[in-house]
Image: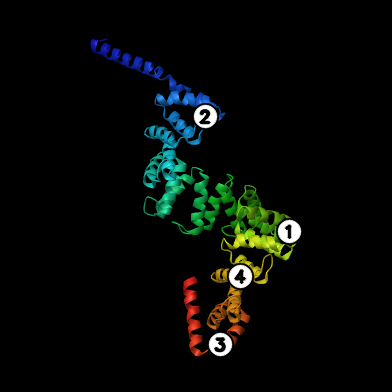
Amino acid sequence: MSDLMKKRLKNLLYVSIYFAIGMQAIPAFSGINEALNEYKNSQFSTAFTQFRKLANAGDAESQYYLGLMYENGQGVPQDYKLAMSWYKAAADQEYAKAQLSLGSLYDDGRVASQDPKTAMTWYRKASMHGNAQAQYKLALMYINGRAVNKEEKTAILWMRKSAEQAEPNAQYQLGYMYEKGIGVTKDAKLAILWYRKAADQGYPDAQFSTGQMYENGYGVAQDYTAAVGWYQKAAQQAHPGAQYRLGVMLALGRGVRQDDKSAMAWFQQAADHGQANAQYNLGAMYESGQIVSQDYKLALAWYRKSAEQGVAMAQYNLASMYANGRGTVKDDKEALAWYVRAAEQGHAEAQYNLGWVYANGQGVTLDIEQAHMWFNLAASSGDKDAIKNRKVAESMMTPKQIEHAQTMAREWQIKFK
């Protein structure tokens, strides 16, 4: 063997020894599995000690978990600034989960003021590493135009990348985008395909949307039984919309045996969670005395909750209760206010009642032009009584007053329609 070959062989031997020593020189990193097991078993104090040792030695995964523990206050006092510091250390080593978490801290403004641009920078870095949650959040920023120009097509690309990795948030959102035609051509079949993928993972919003698709026969054959099944899954996870729709299906006997008491129970749960239509239904049940004992005070209370969320029927019924003193002291001014709110949403009966209120000066100064305007608006919805009363009002008006009232009606329609 030549001297040159011997020298090369010797150099290779040195390199091999160096790497062997190098592998032994970072034994701290080999403890990551033990630290993770302690963390998963909620042994936070032990896990923190192990992670800190590894993190100080430069292990990115341990740095990430230290950040996570500081963020959530696990084994240590909650401290967003220290969380950010450790996330940053891991993120700088291209650790995607840390980049995602760092972006979230900037996005939520939990350390300082919100900084969507910096958040987006970190979401993009994590997305480029294939992190599904970051891809989903990046897509949302493009949808909403946060820190970037609104770009629905770019949003779709990132949303699809995330959804294809089985991220349920993205699967649901992608289904919604196909249903509504956001950044893509409307496609009901693709909508339910993605809804189902998220629904099968137990995602309640997707379960509810799948139920709606089956109930309405949109993108799939109409199937009330399947709709009820999906509504039940979501309702059991306290989804207010699903609780309400399940109540409706039970009340109507669609896809399930008709059961008023069970319907009432689901309406109650949905109403307690703030579902406006369920609150209206409870009000109607208490007012009529169907299924439950008649109770005007409870009817008034539920109507008010629903009315304050903008349900026109609830606003109208609430006004009627004030006008007639049911469940409360008779109050014409309060009745007027709620009639107006319902009328502004195009509720024909509320518009008719306002015409009657102004024609008779009930709680307001008698105003025949206002009366004509409201009768005219109700009449445009086909209300026969409004048509008759409009003629009666015209018999007491000059041509100029009629013309002015008609102008007011046109202006109202432009403003509210």
Report x, y in % for residue 148: 37, 51
Do the numbered discs 2 and 1 sit on residues whose CB atoms are within 8 Å? no
Q: Secondary structure at mark 1?
A: helix
Say if 192 sits above or below 376 in the image.
above
Q: Nearer the viewer, residue 32 or 369?
A: 369
Of tags 4 and 1, which is closer to the observer?
A: 4
Say which of 60 and 396 sits in front.
396
Residue at label 2? 75
Whole-angstrom CA distance, mark 3 to mark 1, is: 47 Å
Badge 2 marks a residue whose secondary structure is loop
Discs 4/3, front: 4
Q: Kindly report which numbered mark, 4 or 2, lies closer to the viewer in this rendering.
A: 4
- Residues at discs 3 and 2 in contact (Cβ within 8 Å): no
Query: In the rendered view of the protein, which quadrant contains the N terminus?
Result: top left
Q: Which residue is mark 4?
A: 335
| Res. 259 visible in picture | no
Residue in the image at 52% along x and 53% along y? 175
Disc 3 marks a residue whose amino acid type is Glu
What residue sits right under mark 3 in the picture?
A: 394
Q: CA distance from mark 4 to mark 3?
A: 25 Å
Label 2 or label 1, whichever lies nearer to me, is: 2
Looking at marks 3 and 2 on the same chain, the residue that comes earlier in the sequence is marked by 2
Amino acid type of the residue tagged 1 in the rendering? Asp
Q: Is residue 229 visible?
A: yes
Query: Is residue 9 or residue 338 the one in the foreground?
Result: 338
Q: What residue is pinned by disc 1? A: 260
Q: Position of residue 142 (x, y in %)?
A: 41, 51
Decide which of tag 4 and tag 3 comes sooner along the chain: 4
- Judge from the rendering whether residue 263 lies leftward or rightward of residue 308; answer left or right: right
Which amino acid type is marked by label 2? Gly
Query: With respect to residue 334, does 154 lie above or below?
Result: above
Helix, strand or loop for disc 4: helix
